[in-house]
Amino acid sequence: MVKPSIAASATRVVLSIGMVAVFTSAAVAQIESRVGTWELDLTKSTFSPGPPPQRQTLTYRAAGPQWTALLQGIDASGKPINPDVGNLLIKFDGRDHSTPTADYETTAWKRVDDRKYLVIRKKAGKVVLTSTNVLSPDGKTMTITTTGHNSAGQAVHNVRVYERQSQ
């Protein structure tokens, strides 16, 4: 019986690890299909109450089992959106996480499937905003529909349509 050389065994191990890495990367890319930069398409989006922002960019990054999100742009009055805010940490565990703003205090993220997730925002323990984030089958368009009430008590119904800019 011929024993394989140490070099041949090492090569097989390296190739095996490489194949696992390739398959794992492909699986993660498929699950994390929103990762990248998205530009708001104002012609396809609606905002109630208005007015809409002048420009808005949403960037998702994968950070292990969680994501980070960064929303930037120019609001309706010409001021920068979130100029001093860093990345928002997203954990898809369905639990409330602190995200204090004027409209809500906590956010819970729940993945429904590889193309859809839900976001529940609460203030004083009460649900105030619910968003559904849906990715198109081709992965080029993302639609976020938000309903509820803002801090002024106004009914909110926003449909934001984003187009992929990069991955």
Image: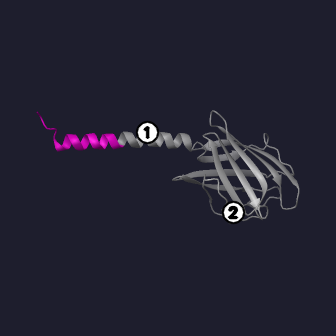
| Amino acid type, callout 1 | Phe
Query: Left of 107 or right of it: where is 48?
Result: right
Tell me what residue is drawn at x 25 percent, y 41 percent.
Answer: 11
Q: Say how many tags the image has.
A: 2
The magenta stretch spans which residues?
1-17
Residue bearing the label numbered 1: 23
Location of residue 153 in the rendering, given as x and y in whole percent from the top left corner: 88, 59
Q: Which SS class for mark 2? A: loop
Q: Nearer the viewer, residue 71 or 54?
A: 71
| Amino acid type, callout 2 | Thr
Residue 13: image quadrant is top left
Q: Are marks 2 and 1 in contact (CB under 8 Å)?
A: no
In the figure, 135 relative to 73: above or below?
above
Question: Which is nearer the N-term, disc 2 or disc 1?
Answer: 1
Location of residue 31 in the rendering, given as x and y in whole percent from the top left corner: 55, 42
Q: Nearer the viewer, residue 71 or 30?
A: 30
Tell me what residue is drawn at x 79 percent, y 61 percent.
Answer: 103
Location of residue 90 in the rendering, given as x and y in whole percent from the top left corner: 62, 55
Q: Residues within 10 Å of mark 2 (few under 14, many from 20)?
A: some
Can residue 13 be found in the magenta stretch? yes
Tell me what residue is drawn at x 64 percent, y 53 percent.
Answer: 94
Location of residue 2 in the rendering, given as x and y in whole percent from the top left corner: 12, 34
